[in-house]
Image (tube, helix red, strand yellow):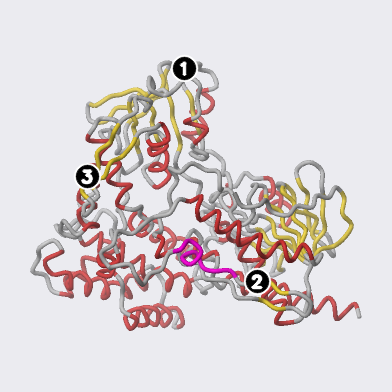
Amino acid sequence: MPKKAITKIMKEDTRIFDVAIVGCGPRGLSALESLFRQAAKNEVLPKVLVVEKSPYPGAGPVYDLDQADSNWLNVSRRAVGINNREKTVFENFSIPDFPDFQEWSGYNAEPHSLTEVDEFPLRSELGKYLHERYNSIAGILHSQGLLVYINGEADIIRIDEQSVVISILGGQSCLAREAALCIGHQPIELDGQMTMWLKRVQELDNCELYTQPYPVSRITNTSTGLSNYTIAIRGFGLAMIDVVRALTIDLDGKFEITDDKKRTMKYHASGKEPRSIIPFSLDGLPMAPKPLNKEIDLLYIPSKDQLEDYGNAIFRRIEKAEARSTDFLIDAIAPIIADKFIAMDSMSIEHTLSRAEIEEIVSQWLRNDTFSHELLIPIDMGALEAINRFIAMATGSGAVSLDYCIGHVWRHCQPTMYRILSFAPLPDDLICKIVALDERLKRYSYGPPVDSLQQLSELADCGILDLSLVNNPEIELAEVGWTFELEGKTDNADIMINSVLDSPQLLKVQSPIIKGILMNEAVAPIHDKLGARTEENGLMISKNSENVVPVAMMGRLAKGTLIGVDAIAECFGTRSVHWAKGVIDRKIQRDSTQV
């Protein structure tokens, strides 16, 4: 096990830190590294407070080192895009370099063939990497008196005239000139359905409701066992897959791969599994897996020239104020998708359409999710059939549909799109529509590995996973638990697990730290469905004026100002660099006025 992060706990500390980093998962780690890289360039030594509630700074709750092995990354080992950290030299000490994830984990791309099956690491493995990377910089900074770490949860941030007051649960308080909120998923107010269920469950003795899917060990570590229960899972995405794995693999079930090329599996039950697992969602649409290997993935990767043309097309439309709808994004990507689909030839669904005709289908489908065509997987196709079709596409054993092609070309264009659109001068309503389109396509672009879909398929075939109620069933919570009905099929569930993760809607966030900022500083969301409005350096903008609040929003809750906040690679991008430059510039200015 890696050593615990260095900790120094204070009760009342009258020192004023230059900056407080509140929340130190991957974003907080990136902020810390960027800050001292910028500090070295300017020959200054900022004093930093780091506050993180989880036991593993750098990793944070999402990449917790102790989580179940059933929680997988949805990014392959070769594709984890976290760059190495270069050595940073100060006059009296240095911060050592640290390798990228591939080198750290012993992965070398050279000996791997294009047809080798991509490996998807455990989330806990990435957490170990991030935690070790944090310790390698935090230990040095602590020894130099430049970093204080508090293992606790900040619940209130108050802005005084000259400082930011950070209050920690338990009574501690600290002062800083400014703060950076690098917090990830925050609880939002429950919707009407969940609120009603929670109230009703408290009145009943024979049913149980989990409002959050993680940690999955809360669900599986039960003294009574789960074999006599039917469990329903609200949601049909990545978290649902983790929960299903927890209810099988973590209960001693085993998947045996019977065909390595197609990744088909046979499930060996332990007898500890639930009687039945019933997932459901509003549309019943399954996620599409990522391609099995690099050879298949190459079919969807735009060339360097195509990516450059794509980026230029988006930028020109924004520069000329011609970006009035999502059409400016659709028009830029449709030609690339058409080229890729035509180049597949016999690997795609058979057709005789021209490039222009395929472009038009792409554009229509991106504008309208109910648009249908024989080249697209129908939205009314059964979930199991759709899963198996997508598996065949991902493994090169079945004809590729146009929507699958769209989703994975979109995935490879996302970094370019995120870079150009973040802080772009676009109307708020358009930003909301862009985010909604990107979220819709995450069913493909953020898809799981093939193995995850094969596990679902096998569990459905052997009767453990019931997909007959997946598409928006009628649900009633009665004395016997939850009753489901869809097209004449009915079933009951004793346990309900909500796997729909909270979206970053600033106005609905329930955590005290965010509610306090909203109340006291009048910080404005960029849209009622999105996050805080920020400057490019991360500092939040007040709702009532152009005043900049001395608190930066670095994470998911800046969604809207930032596009693409959920990808792990984006945590280590240029955003923390812009923030760090601002922090150091402001420190230099303060120091000069005090001389």
Q: Is residue 111 found left or right of 594 in the rendered image?
A: left
First in sequence: mark 3 vs mark 1: 1
Image quarter for residue 471? Answer: top left
Residue located beneath label 3 in the image: 258
Asked if residue 127 can be seen in this view, the reply is yes
Residue stretch in magenta: 98-106
Q: Is residue 363 in view?
A: no
Q: Position of residue 478 (x, y in %)?
A: 42, 19
Q: Give percent across and percent down for residue 151.
A: 72, 48
First-in-chain label (2 vs 1)? 2
Label 1 amino acid? Asn
Label 1: which residue? 206
Q: Position of residue 544 (x, y in %)?
A: 69, 63
Q: Hey, what amino acid is under mark 2?
A: Pro
The residue lying toward the viewer, choosing from 94 and 155, is 94
Q: Tell me what residue is drawn at x 51 percent, y 46 percent.
A: 502
Q: Nearer the viewer, residue 503 or 349?
A: 349
**In the drawing, what numbered circle is on residue 96?**
2
Q: Give the position of the C terminus as an image quadrant.
A: bottom right
Label 2 vs label 1, nearer the camera: 2
Q: Are marks 3 and 1 in contact (CB under 8 Å)?
A: no
Label 3 near label 2: C-beta < 8 Å? no
For residue 99: magenta? Answer: yes
Mark 3 is surrounded, within 10 Å at the Cα level, by few (under 14), some (14 to 19) or many (20 or more) other residues, namely few
Amino acid type, callout 3? Thr
Measuring from the top left, give residue 4's x and y in whole percent. Answer: 67, 51
Distance between the alpha carbons at the discs numbered 2 and 1:
56 Å
